[in-house]
Image (spheres, rainbow, N blue to C red):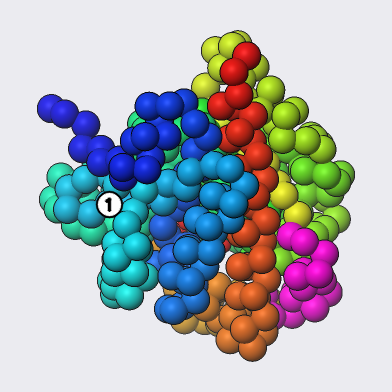
Amino acid sequence: MTLPLTLSPEVAEARANGAAIVALESTIITHGMPFPQNVETARRVEAEVRAHGAVPATIAIIDRQIHVGLTDSELDALGRAQGVAKLSRADLAACLATGGTGATTVAATMICAHLAGIGVFATGGIGGVHRGAETSFDISADLRELAETPVTVVAAGAKAILDLPKTLEVLETLGVPVIAHGQDDFPAFWSRASGLKAPLRMDSAADIAAAHRMRACLGLPGGQLVANPIPAEAEIPRAEIMPHIEAALAEAEAQGIAAKAVTPFLLQRIFELTEGRSLTANIALVLNNARLAAAIALELAAPR
Ligand code: PSU
Ligand code: MN
């Protein structure tokens, strides 16, 4: 069997030349943001990666192929499509085998990026341990993926809809380095601070790239989580966003929202409750993560 991997011409060329590449996910497009802001943001994120000297590789499953690098029309079609599957480690192979269209979550994007030889990936926020996980067992497959697949993931921390202390505990148990960028606090997606100290702190892309290389040198499986705080001018302070998060969580519970539907439901409700401010913040933090990921990719691509 041959690997069902299709690289865009731009990504194929970058790979052949050993140039810097940044992987990007597609669930944020199909399930994380409304149309048309989803497509606009995806394009802006790609442009931001290019402006900082790296090649963007947005990943999605189309027609039995893992596409690494999408054309503009593929991106547009994905952003408009209804009922696209949200793929994680558990359902990636089934989607490829049966010919569906699928968007890749953080976990699935890490798997595909690694298959394409890409070591860095930028997103908004990773999935984590949901509140009430002690009864629901809802712990994102993103966490285990970070323990298994050697890709450095740049995110704005974990969404404050999650149980952040439990998320950090599980990451520690799994042996995943959690590196706050430029501050001590673990960032909480829409807010710069969570009140929780991150286990590690690094202030430069060079250090993050060096740590990535050292893990490979030691033969340690798994990647790194780089928690990059949202820019100050775009943040929604914790005290302001928390009541909206609590309201959205209560609605999800009352309506019996479960499994894969939880994160998209909460994001949509918080968007409505903040009158769009959460989306503006989300876009700013993804662009910020794209810039840092490009800098890390350049460090990883530099000759040594
Ligand atoms: N970050 C965002 N928006 C999103 C997601 C992350 O800013 O929509 C997606 C990612 O694809 C992540 C997924 O992997 O949510 C987590 O879903 P779950 O909690 O069901 O594992
Ligand atoms: Mn879940």
Name the residue nearer the viewer: 32 or 295. 295
Q: Is mark 1 within 8 Å of ligand 1?
A: no
In percent of width and height, residue 169 lies at 69, 41
Task: Tell me: 62 left or right of 170.
Answer: left
Q: Residue at x 25, y 41 (%)?
A: 6
- Closest to the observer, 7 or 239: 7
Position of residue 220 relative to residue 101, above or below, is above
Residue, x 19% and y 57% (percent of image)?
A: 100
The residue carrying mark 1 is 61
Amino acid under disc 1: Ile
Compared to residue 140, the image places residue 160 above or below, namely: below
Q: Residue 131: which quarter of the image? A: bottom right
Q: Position of residue 60 (x, y in %)?
A: 33, 52
Residue 225: x and y in percent read 64, 39
Q: Residue at x 45, y 52 (%)?
A: 25
Q: Which segment is the magenta one? A: 230-245
Asked if the magenta segment contains residue 45, the reply would be: no
Q: Quadrant of residue 27?
A: bottom left
* Rendered-image quadrant of the C terminus: top right
